[in-house]
Image: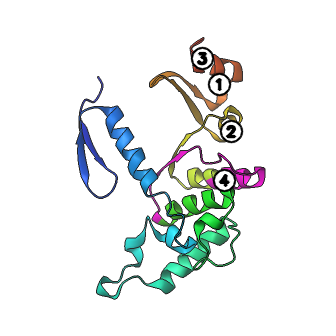
């Protein structure tokens, strides 16, 4: 039986939804809105999702702690930047902008990551760095839901592939049963998964 209503807490405010699709749409919209602020400095973007960690009551943000955490995640992601505190995120390459988005969520430390086309528009080197990070997150116990239209990417990174078309699950494949032709057939509604 499908869930017909429930709550989604994406921004600290619970919203009641009566259809699963509306709840997922609202969640993705809230995540997208928090993704990045292009004109703001890189450090501000990195701290955005976990800002509460550095707020010191009426004293404001503990800039030294934010700077230390931001520097650590920038090093971990091999983020190429001149100055975390002054350089705007929009001045970075596409791959480095994606790393800022990922870094922000690393600092927030969620239990589940929803990555929608995390390597779209990035160079090959940045792609492999992002794949490595996804592997580290999964190995560390985090859940990673990666949405991608690149089959090769999914075959190389995923433990399980769920093929969806027209808002419906067409097939599910576990890593041991990955088969390019069967996955493509399911994507185009020509076959069934295992």
Q: Nearer the viewer, residue 64 or 144?
A: 64
User: Does residue 54 appear left or right of residue 179 in this picture?
Assistant: left
Residue, far bottom: 59
Q: Position of residue 75 (x, y in %)?
A: 66, 71
The first of marks 1 and 3 along the sequence is 1
Q: CA distance from mark 3 to mark 2?
A: 18 Å
Marks 3 and 4 close (CB-CB < 8 Å): no
Q: Quadrant of the N terminus?
A: top left
Question: Which of pointers 1 and 3 indicates the residue nearer the eye?
Answer: 3
Graded by Cα atoms within 10 Å as few (under 14), some (14 to 19) or many (20 or more), the crowding at tag 1 reads: some
Provide the residue designation for mark 4.
130
Graded by Cα atoms within 10 Å as few (under 14), some (14 to 19) or many (20 or more), the crowding at tag 2 reads: some
SS class, disc 1: helix
Provide the residue designation for mark 3.
188
Residue 78: mark in rendering: none
Q: Position of residue 68 (x, y in %)?
A: 55, 81
Residue 177: mark in rendering: 1
The first of marks 4 and 2 along the sequence is 4
Quadrant in the picture for residue 49? bottom left
The first of marks 2 and 1 along the sequence is 2
Quadrant in the picture for residue 140? bottom right
Marks 2 and 1 close (CB-CB < 8 Å): no
Marks 1 and 3 close (CB-CB < 8 Å): no
Graded by Cα atoms within 10 Å as few (under 14), some (14 to 19) or many (20 or more), the crowding at tag 4 reads: many
Judge whether 101 appears above or below 47 on screen: above
- Magenta span: 108-133
SS class, disc 4: helix
């Amino acid at each position: 039986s499908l869930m017909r209503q429930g709550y989604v807490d994406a921004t600290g405010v619970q919203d009641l939804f009566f259809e699963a699709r509306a709840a997922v749409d609202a969640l993705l919209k809230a995540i997208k809105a928090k993704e990045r602020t292009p004109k703001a400095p890189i450090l501000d973007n990195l701290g955005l999702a976990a800002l509460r960690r550095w707020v010191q009551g009426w004293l404001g943000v503990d800039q030294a702690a934010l700077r230390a955490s931001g520097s650590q995640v920038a090093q971990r992601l091999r983020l190429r930047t001149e100055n975390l505190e002054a350089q705007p995120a929009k001045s970075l390459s596409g791959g480095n902008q994606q790393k800022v988005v990922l870094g922000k969520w690393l600092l927030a430390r969620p239990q589940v990551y929803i990555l929608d086309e995390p390597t779209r528009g990035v160079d090959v080197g940045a792609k492999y760095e992002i794949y490595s990070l996804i592997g580290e997150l999964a190995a560390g116990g985090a859940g990673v839901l990666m949405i991608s239209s690149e089959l090769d990417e999914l075959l190389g990174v995923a433990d399980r592939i769920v093929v969806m078309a027209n808002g419906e699950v067409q097939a599910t494949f576990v890593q041991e049963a990955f088969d390019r032709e069967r996955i493509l057939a399911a994507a185009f509604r020509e076959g069934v998964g295992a």
